[in-house]
Amino acid sequence: MTIYIPTPLRPYAEGKDQLDVRADTVQGALDKLTLTFPDLRKHLFTEEGKLRAFVNVYLNDEDVRYLPAKEATTVTATDTLSIIPSIAGGH
Amino acid sequence: MTVLQVTIEVYEAIRAHGEETYPHECCGALLGRPAANGWIIESSVKAGNTRTDSAHNRYQIAPVELVKIEREARKKGLSIGGFYHSHPDHPAQWSPTDFAEAHWLGCSYVITAVTQGKATVTNAFLLAGKTEENKQFEPQTVEIIKTAEPLSARRESNNS
């Protein structure tokens, strides 16, 4: 499957905007990503190993947080995983 | 100070968007290419404001909309280089809420003040820093360009 890396995280992924990995689950894919680029880990996960609150992970067009199996959801080679930091604000 | 280069079309579009949604905040993404000293923005994409509960002073872009925006940007060979939103009847300065909710390090946050329905000042701020813990907003120079041709190439062209 293909993992898409957002602009702010590319400096910690050798400048790459995507990475193709072989994995069985969302968690497996994220593990491969952070094994390949260890500097990404602190940007994606808390010290307890949970996804940071402002980091959204989408399997195709579905928010992984709302999938029944969450990070344990199985994936196929044609799936895509998008990492999207949140955007909000106001005065 | 870093520079945010935006085409005149983008500059006018994001200001017009702020006038369209007044008295609510508008929001959207800025697509472009990284430059030596900032970003060259060549297109903007309007996004919906999901904060319908408080749209006059809050904005939020649905992550799934960002997924789709980024997908389209990739097809054009562009990246998300920043975001824009408006401050209805409020200065074009970042607020504590803007700062707390800013997570796209290395990207530009563009704010347009819209006063009584009319776009006035547009400012840009780079979210600098290497981590969430030491991030900071730095003011940027907004340079309006005719085309998305890199600044260096235009300088060479002007000198020839």
Image: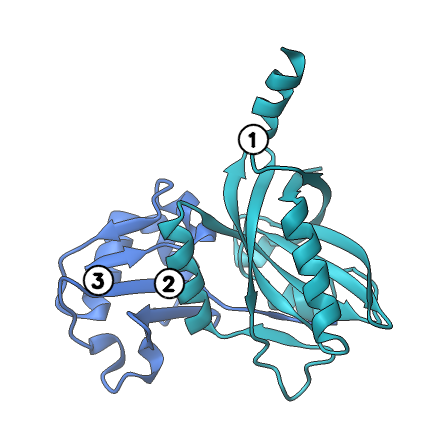
Secondary structure type for disc 1: loop
Residue type for callout 1: Pro
Image vertical order of residue A56 relative to residue B54, above or below = above
Distance from label 1 to label 2 (Cα)? 28 Å
Chain to which the residue tagged by mark 3 belongs: A
Q: Residue at 28% of width from left, 64% of height from top?
A: A81
Distance between mark 3 and mark 1 Cα atoms: 36 Å
- The residue singled out by tag 3 in the image is A29
State the image coordinates of residue A50 (x, y, percent, origin top left).
36, 72
For the residues beneath circles 3 and 1, the answer to whether they share a chain is: no
Q: Which residue is mark 2?
A: A83
Tag 3–tag 1 contact (CB < 8 Å): no
Q: Position of residue B152 (x, y in %)?
A: 59, 24
Q: Which chain is cyan?
A: B
Q: Chain of mark 2?
A: A
> Residue B116: image x %, image y %?
87, 72
